Image (spheres, rainbow, N blue to C red):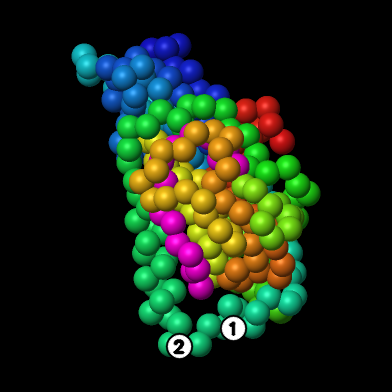
Amino acid sequence: MTDDVVLEGVFAQGGLLKGNVKPSYDVKLNEREIRLTREGDFIIGFGRDAAPEHKLTFSAPNGERHSLIIDVKQRTYPTQSIKGVPQKTVTPSKDKLARIKRETALVKNARKTDSSLLYFLDDFTAPMRAPITGVYGSQRIYNGTPKRPHYGVDYAGPVGAPVYAPASGKVTLVHEDMFYSGGTLIVDHGYGLSSTFIHLSEVVVKEGEDIVAGQEIAKVGAGGRSTGPHLDWRVNWYGTRIDPQLVLLIAGDK
Ligand SMILES: [Zn+2]
C-alpha cells in the first residue's frame, strides 16, 4: 500500500514535504488529519525544533491501514547577534503589550486560513534577488538580549525595492505598521501554506485580492524591530514555521 505513496521534499526541521496518495485515502500526520486535494495531493511541514521521527498513517476506505515513519533531520542553528535595533522593540514598555497581543492575534488568525487554493503545489521563486543577511532558525540576540529565534529569510535591499509574489495566492492580511514587524503582508497559497512579508514600507495589494506569482506586492522598508531596510519573508504551514530557503530548494531556486 505504501507503494502508492509519493513523498518528496526536504526531510529536515523546517522542511516542507509534498505528497500524493489515492484521493480516497485518509491521511494522518501523527494524530493530525491531513487534507487532500481531489487529486490526492497534500503537504506536511516540520517546525524548527521538530522531533526526529513522525508517523504518517494512510487508511484505505476498506479499513486497510499502513504507517510510515518519517525521519526528520535535526539541524543546528547559528547564533546571530544584532546590535542597533530600537531598544523599545527589545524591551517594549507595558503600554505596548496590548497592541503587541492584538497584532499577534491578527497574524495567527491569518495563518489559520484553510482555503482550497492549489497554489501550494506550485514551484516558489525568491521574492527578490538580493544578498541574504538572515536565515531561518538562527538564535537572535538583540542589543545583547537573547530573544526568540528568527524564522524568516532576510534579503538586504533599499527602502522602496520591489517585493514579488513567490507564488500565486490570496491576500489575507495587510497591516501598515505592526510593533515588531512594521508593514506586514500575508498571502495564502492554499491548504495552510502562507507567506508573510515584514518590515515593508508599502503594500501595493489589498486584503482579499487574488495575486499571481511574480506580481509586485510590496516595497522593502525598515519598520519594526529592524536595524535597516530589508525584506523578511516567512513561510508557514498553518502555525508551523517552515524554512523558506528549503521551499525554494525543492523548486530548484536559491
Ligand atoms: Zn528578519
Which label's residue is closer to the chain start, 2 or 1? 1
Q: Looking at this view, is 151 or 197 the one in front?
A: 197
Tell me which amino acid carries mark 2. Answer: Lys
Q: Residue at x 38, y 36 (%)?
A: 191
- Say which residue appears at 71% left-offset and 79% top-offset: 143
The magenta span reads: 164-179
Name the secondary structure under disc 1.
helix
Q: Dot 2 lies on which element?
A: helix
Quadrant (top left/top right/bottom left/bottom right) for the C terminus: top right
Pinpoint residue 155: horizontal percent, then vertical percent: 71, 52
The answer to which quarter of the image holds residue 90 is bottom right
Structural crowding at the residue carrying mark 1, measured as other residues with C-alpha within 10 Å and reported as few (<14), some (14–19) or many (≥20): few
Residue found at x 43% / y 87%: 95
| Figure quadrant of residue 123 | top right
Nearer to the camera, 228 or 101: 228
Q: Which mark is residue 9?
A: none
Residues at badges 2 and 1 in contact (C-beta under 8 Å)? no
**Quadrant of the snapshot with the N terminus:** top left
Residue 115 vs residue 30, the one in the foreground: 115
- The picture places residue 82, in percent across and down from the top left corner, at 73, 70
Give the camera-side residue of 108 and 149. 108
Residue underneath mark 1: 88
Q: Which residue is mark 2?
A: 94
